[in-house]
Image (cartoon, helix red, strand yellow):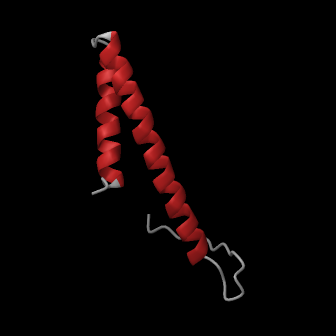
Amino acid sequence: MPESFEESMRQLEEIVQKLEEGNLPLEESLRLFEEGIKLSRKCQERLDQIERRIELLLKDKDGMPFLDEFESDV
């Protein structure tokens, strides 16, 4: 079962924290770095998919993209 985007981000944050501490052996640092790169790519691919879905949803009846101002409640 694929992990959620949120779970992948959580794992990536843990890896970054461990690497920033700087007290791991070189081989372990390299392994974590490789794992972090894979997670980062996975998250970016998921964000790209979501962006494409949003673009499809924001097309008008003629299939042309349209922009609408975002109104914030803040």
Q: Residue at x 35, y 28 (%)?
A: 16
Q: How many marks?
A: 0
Query: Residue placed at 67% from the left, 89% from the top?
Result: 61
Please give left or right for residue 30 compared with residue 25 in the image.
right
Is residue 70 at least partly visible in the picture? no
In the displayed structure, does residue 56 sit left or right of residue 9? Answer: right
Residue closer to the observer: 23 or 32: 32
Name the outermost residue toward the bottom: 61
Q: Is residue 74 left or right of residue 71?
A: left
Above or below: residue 63 compared with residue 38: below
Judging depth in this view, the residue of 19 and 37 nearest the camera is: 37
Spot the residue most to the front.
1
Compared to residue 43, the image places residue 29 above or below, namely above
Image quadrant of residue 24?
top left
Percent x, y for residue 29? 34, 18
Residue at 66%, 84% (x, y): give it.
60
- Residue 45, given in percent of the width and then of the height, sits at 50, 51
Q: Nearer the viewer, residue 73 or 14?
A: 14
Tell whether 24 sits left or right of 53. left
- Give the quarter of the figure containing the C terminus: bottom left
Rendered residue at 41%/28% (across/down): 34
Tell me, yes or no, if residue 60 can be seen here.
yes
Quarter of the image with the N terminus is bottom left
When asked about the image quadrant of residue 62, the answer is bottom right
Q: Position of residue 23 (x, y in %)?
A: 27, 11
